[in-house]
Amino acid sequence: MNPQLSRRRFIKAVIASSVAAASSSGIHSALAQDRPRGAVERLISLNINGQTRRVDVSPQETLAHTLRYKLGLTGTKIGCNRGECGACTVIIDGVTNYSCSTLTHSVRTRAVQTVEGVQSADGSLHPVQQAFIDELSPQCGFCTPGQVMSAVALLQENPKPTRDEVRHAMAGNLCRCGAYDHYLNGVMRASGQNS
Amino acid sequence: MASFDVMPDVQLYQPVELDDALNLADELGDEGWLLGGGQDTYGWLKDRAKQPRAMIDLNGIEALHGISETNDGIEIGAATTLREIIRDERVNRDYSLLVEAAGRVASPQIRNVGTLGGNLSQDTRCWYYRRGLDCYRAGGNICYANGPESMNREHAVIGASRCVAVSPSDTATALVALEATMVARSVKGERTIAAEDFFVGPDTHITQMTSLKAGEILTAVRIPAKWAGKKFYFEKVADRDVWDFALVSIAVAMSMDGDTIGDSRFVCGGVACTPHRLTNVERAVRGKSLSEESAEAVAPMASEGTKPLNYNHFKLPLMENLVRRAMRG
């Protein structure tokens, strides 16, 4: 068996069983039927990477939590969980957001794009992803999904940015390996300009 | 004290009509929490340092969005994002001071969701207070930031009263300089508050940063035509260019009469619990031109009346130098 798959399946199973245990024993008090009048409904549809996903979301849940632990989209990383690092960056209606600091309920009517959704339909990498590989941009790689999303959003809006514009657009993504210049090189290459 | 990084159980309302939001805010009172972009909110909640019963998400209310012209200037809805303000043509043309200030807030992702109302209403960054300690601001009777060994390099150098926390908002300094008016609504009706009175110091209300009452919602900010297209200067000094709050910032609006300065507003951020007007500098620059000479003459006045704490003396030359740079033209 593929060890990675089995580990992931195991974690998913643990999460699923704990959710079941919690709801059957009544720990989750805020079920749909006993929410206060006018408060948000828990069962909602989300538009994630062009697909409609039905999911049970508690009122206070963050998008990063929903993506990773309910929808299995673990490409989005949780670094600080405080909007201070950028590892959880996703694109919502064309604009970058920290998914750790976004309520899932606030994106019900909006289009969410995660790092899983940037490659093309045939599975080939997005130019930004390919350029990051070519320029050896990531070092440890933990901040990379967030860096990809910020770069993708920038190039959608400004296909030929200057190096300084890239620097400003990527300023909300920390890289603790300090590979910033390599990411800058990657974005410049992805935009078809000399890095 | 235990540390958490996940959200606590809290209820969420997402009204689409302002009246519904006002009713909710009225019903919930102190137990309700108004939600703009949420970038100040979630830290408080994840730390369990503030424990509201329910959040009222204001972003779905159309009436709180957008920038419109009025008879006397412009009106910006409180839920308008900083990103929208930075990119607005009219604001760029007439009130570039606000654009520069909003452009220096936090990081791109935070400016994408952060609202003007939220930036103005955010709570102070005093780390003792935000840690959930029982200080004056949290209703206790001690200040942890002003003891012999307190770490207070980011705290107030003027206007402190028991609490030494400072105003963290970048847009607040710009809006005080532009003589903006805040519009607040409650179930009882609407009232307008001058920007200078909107922000309150610890001598007025030690547990709050603004004069908003429980149940009131900041709905809009009006900027008068008086300062449209005038001479502006904004500069923010922070440890890092991204994320960090101002150590000291300055927002200046000057009405030029040829080469000489007429009316002016000099406002410092990061030095007091409210945006701090340098009224002595404003008086001194009247009739002067923008030059190295007048910069040298008025700069030392910037730090008059300050009382630094153990670790924030460095803010005094910063205030003076920011005035100096504003006056060089």
Image (cartoon, coloured by chain):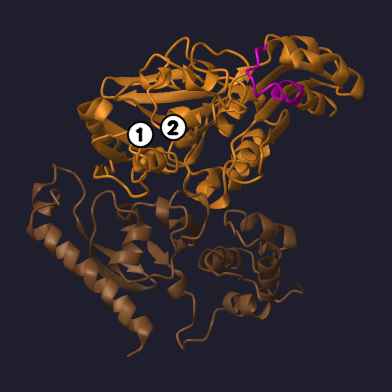
Chain colours: A brown, B orange
**Chain letter belonging to callout 2:** B
CA separation, marks 2 and 1?
Answer: 7 Å
* Number of other residues with Cα within 10 Å of mark 1, as a class: few under 14, some 14 to 19, many 20 or more: some
Please provide percent x and percent y for residue B140: 36, 17
The quadrant in which residue A158 appears is bottom right
- Residues at discs 2 and 1 both on one chain: yes
| Residue ID for mark 2 | B130
- Quadrant position of the N terminus of chain A in the picture: bottom left
Regarding residue B77, the answer to whether it shows in the image is: no
* Number of other residues with Cα within 10 Å of mark 2, as a class: few under 14, some 14 to 19, many 20 or more: some
The reply to whether callout 2 and callout 1 are in contact (CB within 8 Å) is yes
Q: Nearer the viewer, residue B304 or B140?
A: B140
Please provide percent x and percent y for residue B110: 51, 48
Q: Amino acid at mark 1?
A: Ala
**What's the residue at 62%, 79% (across, down)?**
A133
| Residue ID for mark 1 | B49
Q: Which residues are magenta?
A: B306-318
**What's the residue at 23%, 69% (across, down)?**
A14
Q: Amino acid at mark 2?
A: Arg
SS for dot 2:
helix
B146 within the magenta span: no
For marks 2 and 1, the one nearer the N-term is 1
SS for dot 1:
loop
Regarding residue A91, the answer to whether it shows in the image is: yes
